[in-house]
Image: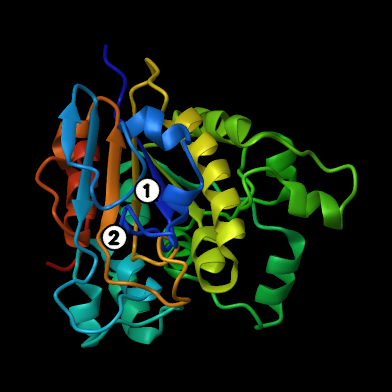
Amino acid sequence: MSSPPRLLFIFLDGVGLGVPDSAANPFITAGPTAFDDLLGGPLASDLPAFSRGQLLFSQLDATLAVAGLPQSATGQSTLLTGKNAARVMGAHYGPWPGPTLRRLLDEGNLFSASVSSGAGAAIANMYPPPYFRSLDQGRQRVNAPVHAALTAGLQLRQTADFEAGQAVSADLTGEYLARMHPGSRVVSPEQSGRELRSLAGRYGFTFFDFWLSDQVGHRGTLADAEDLVRKLARFLAAAVEPHDDGVTVIVTSDHGNLEDKSVRTHTRAPVPLLVSGPAADQFAGVTDLTGVAPAVSRVLGLELSRHR
């Protein structure tokens, strides 16, 4: 009997496909990375789409046919629901989902559909104690993935889960947690990638939210961005490495930012779509953010929305 399909969604906040000859593009200036080995070249706008066996790469339009710079809340809500959240809002909006986007997510998202189907779902991030304290005190707003996961009844993973290898640190190593709590576990990006892949084998739908890329895009230097690109490439190479585990890994983003360090704003650049695994061919026709959730739903056999 074949095992049920498993899908690991690695979400990169603010990672577009930038101009390849720009001195401001850390995916170029960082030098050769694991992206070159995996894709045949740096993650940039001149990287051609391809489909080779169980590996697919293409470029997605993140503008949602709406004027202005794409934003996180509308982009993430679109990825999780398959609905054009910027059209629903009448504009790009973010970073946090307000009442309109929260209602859109509540109507049906990949987390809730996976849970209701019996496939199961997990948000793999480790959230440290200060995050929960801020939530309890009303000082922390949640982003679209966390709202969607909580709507589905999921529990956010904590430091004990990370120590047990059952959650992934937002910095891919746990170093920032170890600075707060000396003696905490510190791992390599490769180990985090392998642990995430192992966790994904237990659920129909597993989601990891990598938000440092957007933060460094806004606030970091080009050198900061280069360091992050190298670390991210090592993590992704381990996470997407082929295994006979039935897991399909999808990597994509909500908008551009990190790829152009000449500005500190989001961009209208296309975003990458990288899919590795037995269901990679199901994503061949996806051209923009609205097509991602329906493709995931086809792979997992989900009823995405309660309100069509």
Check disc 2 and report its element: helix, strand or loop: helix
Quick check: marks 2 and 1 in contact, CB under 8 Å? Answer: no
Q: Residue at x 9, y 45 (%)?
A: 285
State the CA–CA distance, disc 2 to disc 1.
Answer: 17 Å
| Side (left or right) of 276 relative to 97 | left
Q: Of label 2 and label 1, which has the lower sequence position?
A: 2
**For this rendering, which residue is in front, 288 or 305?**
288
Residue 201 picture location, percent across and down: 44, 28
Give the image quarter of residue 62. bottom left
Q: State whether residue 124 appears in this view.
A: yes
Residue 303 visible, this angle: no
Residue at 33%, 47% (x, y): give it: 114
Query: Residue flagged by tag 2: what amino acid is it?
Result: Leu
Expressed as whole percent of the image width and height from the top left, the position of residue 38 reads 36, 30
Amino acid type, residue under disc 1 in the picture: Val
Name the residue that disc number 1 marks. Answer: 115
Tag nearer the camera, 2 or 1: 2
The residue pinned by badge 2 equals 79
Q: Residue at x 76, y 48 (%)?
A: 175
Please state the horizontal and vertical placement of residue 202, each as a whole percent of the image. 46, 31
| Residue farthest toward the right in the current orientation of the protein | 182
Residue 180 is tagged as: none
Vertical comparison of 2 with 197: above or below: above
- How packed mark 2 is, by other alpha carbons closer than 10 Å (few <14, some 14-19, many 20 or more), is many
**Residue 168 relative to residue 63: left or right:** right
Most foreground residue, 304 or 306: 304
Q: Is residue 120 above or below residue 228?
A: above
Give the image quarter of residue 245.
top left
